[in-house]
Image (spheres, helix red, strand yellow):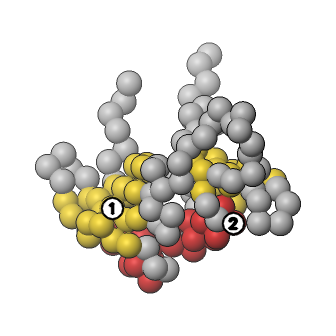
Amino acid sequence: MTDTRTPPPQVWPTLRATDARALIRFLADAFGFVEVVVYGDGARVDHAQLSWPLGGGIMLGSASGRGDDDKWALKPGTFGCYVVADDIDGLHERAAKAGAEIVKPPHDTGYGSRDFIARDPEGNLWSFGTYRGEPA
């Protein structure tokens, strides 16, 4: 018998932040990500996991204080991600009220999705849309 349940996420988009704790609060308030775990002391975040209510999630951490041997030195503000959402207009309104810079307001695409694009305070781009991808 084949297990037809959706497996847990196996691909985790990751980013670094200048102020990771502030970014975590923003992503929860503006977009609806849910904080799962945050490791670190004081302002520093060594590792954080945020889940997305429809499935999947992201991981992030502080950019500073990692030393010269950091092999995952992602520059804050250079991240971009597409996130599937159901209520694009409601999410757009929530994001705008929370202070997200709206790069492109809600619009319908030629492939049947309703999308909008926002920028977080660190400069990362977030594209939200109803397009769930095609089956494999």
Whether residue 97 can be seen here:
yes
The amino acid at mark 2 is Arg
Q: Which mark is residue 45?
A: none
Total number of numbered labels?
2
Q: Foreground: 123 or 28?
A: 123
Circle 2 SS class: helix
The percent position of residue 125, horizontal first and vertical second, equals 40, 57
Instruction: Determine the image quadrant of residue 24.
Output: bottom right
Give the residue furthest to the top.
1
Bin the neighbour count of mark 1 within 10 Å (Cα to Cα): few under 14, some 14-19, many 20 and up: many
Q: Which mark is residue 117?
A: 1
Q: Foreground: 80 or 73?
A: 73
Question: Which image quadrant: the C terminus?
Answer: top left
Q: Residue at x 34, y 38 (%)?
A: 133
Real-space CA distance between mark 2 and mark 1, rounded to the nearest whole angstrom: 22 Å
The residue singled out by tag 2 in the image is 21
Question: Which image quadrant: the N terminus?
Answer: top right
The amino acid at mark 1 is Ile
Q: Residue at x 48, y 56 (%)?
A: 77
The reply, left or right, for residue 5 in relation to residue 62 is left
Q: Is 68 situated above or below 49?
A: above
Give the residue furthest to the front.
68
Whether residue 38 can be seen here:
no
Bin the neighbour count of mark 2 within 10 Å (Cα to Cα): few under 14, some 14-19, many 20 and up: some
Q: Residue at x 32, y 34 (%)?
A: 134
